[in-house]
Amino acid sequence: MNVFIVGGAGKVARGLARLLSEDGHAVRSLYRKPEQARDLAALGARAIQGDLTALSIDALASLMAGSDAVVFSAGAGGAGMEVTNAIDGRGLELTVAAARQAFIRRFLLVSAFPDALRGGERNPGFENYARVKKLADAHLVASDLDWVILRPGTLTDGPGTGRVRAAAAIPYGAVPRDDVAATLAAIIERPDVSRTIIELTSGDTPIDEALARIARR
Ligand SMILES: NC(=O)c1ccc[n+]([C@@H]2O[C@H](COP(=O)([O-])OP(=O)(O)OC[C@H]3O[C@@H](n4cnc5c(N)ncnc54)[C@H](OP(=O)(O)O)[C@@H]3O)[C@@H](O)[C@H]2O)c1
């Protein structure tokens, strides 16, 4: 398959590009900073430069033309409310519009658990992040695309285990970015996982088995 990754230089996205390339998929990764191009090529991806805050719907649709699936894994990464609104919010809406214009129906979104706010001190930036992520989910759900929303728990950089807990609603927890990337790669291979929200943490179930249970529902 031809897969277009928005936020392609991000940590989850890099792992996904490597896995998809190893599996024989053609990957195009949207990135911003010139120094990222070489790393992405080394992962097997074709690096496509573009900034979500500068691209029009037409321009992004042209960049992603011919793809079979789009993965949105971009995020402001704590850069402040305005940037969160621009990337996690408007950037997602732009990408949905561009995918529709380019006739790409399959759309995977890396979102966040609504519970991520629990237990911490009240933080306006994080409140805004949770609000924007939820509105982005709602925007995609209201579209006519063949979407999957993946809501990972707290992302960690430890090695993946290939075992997860994944379902429409699960208790909050953490998950290595490697396992998020592996789950996205597995969803790309499973058209029967469609129009569903999946919460994801570390767990005991092999990723393929967890997705098979979701697909059967
Ligand atoms: N951290 C957590 O615990 C957690 C939990 C659940 C979900 N998430 C979500 O999971 C997703 C992936 O996480 P991650 O750790 O892989 O994030 P990451 O490494 O911060 O990657 C996000 C990517 O988005 C890109 N981006 C930012 N602004 C952009 C713009 N204007 N145009 C194009 N690309 C832009 C960044 O580009 P640059 O490389 O140029 O900065 C970066 O490569 C994020 O959406 C995050 O919100 C995070």
Image: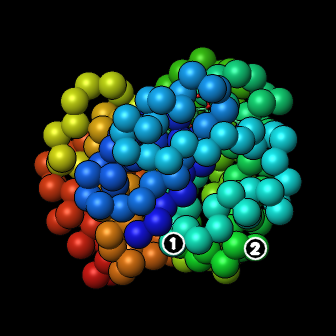
Q: Is residue 213 left or right of residue 13?
A: left
Element at badge 2? Answer: helix
| Residue 200 coordinates in the image, percent (x, y) | 36, 49
Residue 101's tag is 2
Residue with the mark numbered 1: 68
Q: Nearer the viewer, residue 43 or 106?
A: 43
Question: Residue placed at 15% from the left, 55% from the top?
Answer: 205
Q: Is residue 130 left or right of residue 192?
A: right
Drawn side of residue 161 relative to residue 148, left or right: left
Q: Residue at x 28, y 67 (%)?
A: 211
* Tag shown at residue 54: none
Query: Ligand 1: which quarter?
Result: top right
Q: Earlier in the sequence, mark 2 or mark 1?
A: 1
Specify whether 208 is left or right of 78: left
Can the viewer see residue 46? yes
Three-letter residue code for mark 2: Gln
Q: Quadrant of residue 54?
A: top right
Instruction: Kindly identify the amino acid type of the residue bearing the numbered disc 1.
Output: Asp
Q: Residue 48's spot in the image, x, y percent?
A: 61, 45
Residue at (18, 47) in percent of width and height: 162
The kind of secondary structure element at disc 1 is loop
Quadrant location of the N terminus in the rendered image:
bottom left
The C terminus appears in which quarter of the rendering?
bottom left
Callout 1 crowding tier (Cα within 10 Å): few <14, some 14–19, many ≥20: some
Q: Is residue 128 above or below residue 107?
A: above
Asked which quadrant contains residue 83, the reply is top right
Q: CA distance from mark 2 to mark 1?
A: 13 Å
Q: Is mark 1 within 8 Å of ligand 1?
A: no
x%, y% of residue 208? 20, 63
- Which residue is nearer to you in this view: 121 or 215? 215
- Residue occupying image coordinates x 33% and y 52%: 21
Horizontal and vertical percent position of residue 78 = 64, 23
